[in-house]
Amino acid sequence: MLKQKYDNLISYLKNLGSVAVAFSGGVDSTLLLKVCSDVLKENVLAIMVIAPYTPKWEVEEAKVLLKQFGVKYKFIEVEMIDEIKFSPRDRCYICKNAIFTKIKEEASAQGIYNILDGTNFDDTKDYRPGLKALKELNIISPLLANEFTKADIRTLSKELNLQTWNKPAYACLLSRIPYGQEVILAELQRIEAAEVYLMGLGFSGVRVRSHVDLARIELPKKYFDKILNQKILEEISMKLKELGFKYVTLDLEGYKMGSLN
């Protein structure tokens, strides 16, 4: 079944000729870029948009992957979008629209008109207003078109020896801030620093939801036994308070995709 999807994906990409891939360094766009580079060779351009809410560590990981693939690439740095300063419910739509407009402009300047992204079949089952922007801008989603699920993507990534095959999903830092709350650069930096610290303790897939003075830590439940240790809890509390949070809490329901939706 997966082999058939893979073969279909290869045929699908061959028909496109030349493409620009919206690249983030995540498991989906990494697989897509890998297959594109294998199939289309030099007719591939990877474009990564770096916003104030893009984790710096993810940018560094993306740079390593791009060098490994040997594809042409372009980084586009953007400022905070005024329309999302107070976290409206459609912030994902506004952001995607702005980012992919930039990507289309850059690709068009280089004579490329097929813009690809890593949306997969499972993405259609969650609240993702950004998908509306992709549709409006005629962005092509080959993984979705060929019905790749997240499990398919991880399995194929492992078979292709991609180091991202088991990388946890990481949404942009805006997703850590509740709707209606002002987005402040210093707060984004604080959130990222807290998550990097927790990942360094071995808690991959962690989210630090920021409610102004309060940090709400969401972890996959498999880590509960590890984190519910008095010494570790005290160290985490101390570190996050050093970063500027007044209160540090652990969400007893664990990590939930789209918990602020």
Image: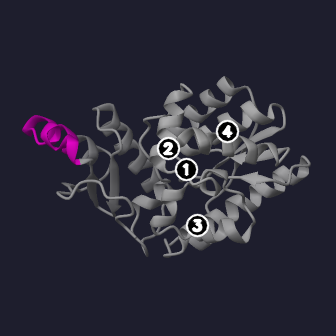
Q: Of discs 4 and 3, which sits in the foreground?
A: 4
Using residue 145 as the reference point, say whether residue 159 is left or right of it.
left
Closest to the observer, 151 or 95 = 151
Q: Which sits earlier in the primary sequence, circle 2 or circle 4? A: 4
Q: Amino acid at mark 1?
A: Phe
Q: Which sits earlier in the primary sequence, circle 1 or circle 3? A: 3
Q: Which sits earlier in the primary sequence, circle 3 or circle 2? A: 3
For the residues labelled 1 and 4, say whether their Cβ atoms are less than 8 Å apart.
no
**Disc marking residue 243:** none
Q: Which sits earlier in the primary sequence, circle 1 or circle 4? A: 4
For the residues labelled 4 and 3, say whether their Cβ atoms are less than 8 Å apart.
no
The picture places residue 198, in percent across and down from the top left corner, at 30, 39
Label 2, secondary structure: give it. Answer: helix
Residue at screen point 77% across, 46% down? 20
User: Visible in this render: residue 163?
Assistant: no
Local crowd size for mark 3, using a 10 Å CA cut-off: few (<14), some (14–19), many (≥20) = some
Measure the alpha-carbon separation of dots 3 and 2.
22 Å
Closest to the observer, 203 or 231 = 203
Closest to the observer, 207 or 156 = 156
Q: Is residue 4 magenta?
A: no
Q: Amino acid at mark 2?
A: Asp
For the residues labelled 2 and 1, say whether their Cβ atoms are less than 8 Å apart.
yes
**Disc marking residue 148:** 1
Q: Amino acid at mark 3?
A: Gly
**Disc marking residue 33:** 4
The residue indicated by pointer 2 is: 152
Residue at screen point 66% across, 69% down? 133
Colouring scheme, one of rainbow, by chain, secondary structure, one colour? one colour
**Disc marking residue 130:** 3
